[in-house]
Image (cartoon, rainbow, N blue to C red):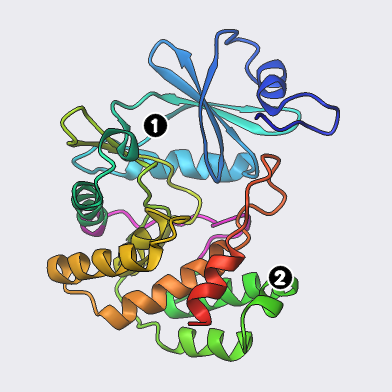
């Protein structure tokens, strides 16, 4: 069911009326953490951004122009300021989301690992804000541990009312996690490597990685590897078993420290626990998932 705006208009109808007047045949094809995506024809899609501002989206467009992987990445063609949200018109990339082609965990995991390898080898260092913040993730001269610690503490304090009752000894656990973050070289961290953001062809071959921007930052590529195992099947009751299988595959392929993967996973869940706060689509938060991991 499509949720409604304050005036009773469905979100989809509001978007079509307010932002996509030039595309009367627009078809909504996806809703993610950052917004809704519509196919508008002529090889283009329109993305309605629920939280991002104009300056942030211009930065993202510049970042996309600098990314060069062996698989396709987004390209922003136009940017519009609507009365409620911002809209980008982008090239429609080939392929379909990974989860729609082959739900087999083993096959899907191989595609995820290939994407992680692509990202780890990228030579672009992003300078973008993350989540709903406005300043770049890392200040000039700031190291990865300091930047990640600052973001984590800000998020925990902001959502303490939900996190505090759910996670035992919250502050002590947060500080122990942050003390374990190494000062690693800066690489490209996508921050939202999910089966919905990986596109493949009919033979399950990678074609594109999409939806940078939510938590795209300069940092340790092991962070992406840690969060990918959780984000692939975030709401599955077997999530802990899925994470273990991902960790084993990641350690085998990339040599990352298993303890570091667990540290980054816990930090990631703290950061996204309220990523849907004030989301007009009313999706569940991940506080329970963060609590289940940190209290175990």
Residue 162 badge: 2
Residue 124 badge: none
Number of other residues with Cα within 10 Å of mark 2, as a class: few under 14, some 14 to 19, many 20 or more: some
Q: Residue at x 30, y 39 (%)?
A: 98
Q: Residue at x 51, y 79 (%)?
A: 294
Q: Nearer the viewer, residue 114 or 166?
A: 166
Q: Nearer the viewer, residue 222 or 200?
A: 200
Q: Residue at x 78, y 24 (%)?
A: 9
Residue 204 image-quadrant placement: top left
Identify the secondary structure beneath mark 2: helix
Q: Residue at x 25, y 38 (%)?
A: 102
The x and y percentages for residue 3 are: 71, 33
Upstream in the sequence, badge 1 or badge 2?
Answer: 1
Number of other residues with Cα within 10 Å of mark 1, as a class: few under 14, some 14 to 19, many 20 or more: many
What segment carries the magenta color? 120-138
For the residues marked 1 and 2, what is the alpha-carbon distance in whole angstroms? 37 Å
């Amino acid at each position: 069911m499509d949720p409604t705006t304050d005036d009773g208009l469905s979100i989809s109808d509001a978007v079509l009326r307010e932002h996509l007047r030039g595309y009367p045949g627009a078809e909504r094809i996806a809703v993610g953490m950052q917004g809704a995506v519509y196919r508008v024809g002529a090889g283009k899609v329109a993305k309605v951004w629920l939280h991002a501002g104009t300056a942030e989206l211009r930065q993202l467009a510049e970042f996309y122009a600098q990314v060069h992987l062996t698989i396709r990445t987004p390209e922003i063609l136009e940017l519009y300021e609507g009365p409620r949200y911002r809209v980008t018109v982008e090239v429609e990339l080939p392929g379909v989301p990974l989860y729609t082609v082959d739900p087999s965990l083993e096959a899907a995991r191989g595609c995820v690992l290939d994407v992680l390898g692509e990202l780890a080898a990228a030579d672009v260092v992003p300078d973008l804000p993350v989540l709903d913040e406005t300043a770049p993730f890392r200040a000039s001269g700031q190291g990865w541990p300091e930047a990640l610690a600052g973001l984590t503490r800000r998020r925990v304090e902001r959502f303490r009312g939900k996190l505090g009752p759910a996670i035992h000894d919250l502050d002590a656990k947060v500080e122990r996690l942050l003390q374990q973050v190494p000062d690693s070289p800066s690489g490209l961290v996508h921050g939202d490597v999910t089966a919905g953001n990986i596109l493949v062809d009919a033979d399950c071959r990678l074609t594109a990685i999409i939806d940078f921007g939510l938590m795209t930052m300069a940092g340790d590529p092991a962070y992406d590897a840690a969060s990918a195992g959780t984000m692939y099947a975030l709401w599955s009751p077997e999530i802990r078993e899925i994470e273990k299988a991902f960790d084993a595959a990641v350690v085998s392929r990339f040599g990352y420290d298993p303890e570091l993967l667990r540290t980054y996973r816990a930090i990631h869940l703290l950061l996204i626990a309220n990523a849907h706060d004030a989301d007009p689509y009313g999706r569940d938060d991940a506080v329970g998932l963060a609590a289940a991991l940190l209290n175990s």
